[in-house]
Every structure is written in structure tokens, then in C-alpha cells.
Image (cartoon, rainbow, N blue to C red):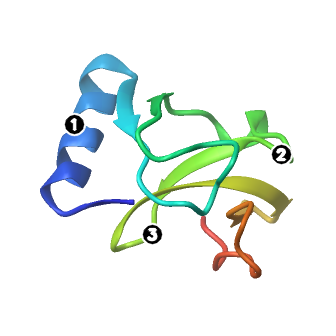
Amino acid sequence: MVAGAQCAAVSQALRRRGRTILRVHGRSMYPMLRTGVRLEVQPTAYDELRIGDLVVYHDGCGIICHRLIRKAERLCYMKGDTNLFADPPVL
């Protein structure tokens, strides 16, 4: 998860360059993503997202990267691979 001022910097980089690089912290996506791995992130339209894709989103507290497990009515449902429960849906 990325928090605080870093969220603003990520948003600004996405607007300016259309992509950015993030470093993974945490274990929710282990072993697919390990702490320290770098991800290239770019905006993607809802219609282009497929079940199983990794989605990076802001949950109000920080930036999270979890797997898309369901799409319905413009909502995305994500879950960390090692988490027991899904995240709240994201518009």
C-alpha cells in the first residue's frame, strides 16, 4: 500500500505520462508479487478489465494492488491472493 503524499504523486505521474512505476509493499499478493517488486501502472478502461487482472486502485487510505475477481454494474470486486475476504467494491 502507498499512502499520503505518494498517492498524489502517483496520480500526477499518471496524468502527465500515462504510466508510472510503483514498488510493492506487503504480502497480500504473495507469491505473485513480493515486497520490493516494481510494477508499471497505467490507466485502463473498465471495459478492458478481465477477471484475473491485477488492478491498482486508491481505497481512500492508500494505493492497493489486488486481483479482479468480479465485475458488475460498473463495480470492480478485488481480493488479495492471500486474503480470506474480498475488498469492498470499487467504482
* Vertical side of 30 occupied by 14: above or below: above
Label at residue 52: 2
Residue placed most toward the observer, 44 or 38: 38
Task: Please tell me whether mark 1 sits on a helix, a strand or a loop.
Answer: helix
- Residue nearest the viewer, comparing 24 with 47: 24
Which residue is at a point 30% across and 18% down the rendered structure image?
17
Q: Mark 1 or mark 3: which comes first in sequence?
A: 1
Residue at image point 19% right, 50% down? 6
Where residue 89 sits: x, y (%)? 67, 74
CA distance separating discs 2 and 3: 19 Å
Residue type at the position of mark 3? Asp
Number of dots carrying numbers: 3
The percent position of residue 72, horizontal first and vertical second, equals 84, 64
Please name whichever residue, 6 or 31, is drawn nearer the observer in this view of the structure: 31
Which structural element holds mark 3?
A: loop
Marked residue nearer the N-terminal end (1 or 2): 1
As drawn, the label of residue 59 is: 3
Quadrant of the drawing holding the C terminus: bottom right
Q: Is residue 19 above or below residue 7?
A: above
Q: Quadrant of residue 50?
A: top right
In the picture, the disc for residue 12 is 1
Tell which of 74 and 49 is nearer to you.
Answer: 49
Q: Residues within 10 Å of mark 2 (few under 14, many from 20)?
A: few
Q: Is residue 28 above or below residue 41?
A: below
Q: Amino acid at mark 2?
A: Gly
Tell me the distance, in whole angstroms, between the alpha carbons under discs 1 and 2.
Answer: 27 Å
The residue located at (25%, 53%) in the rendering is 7
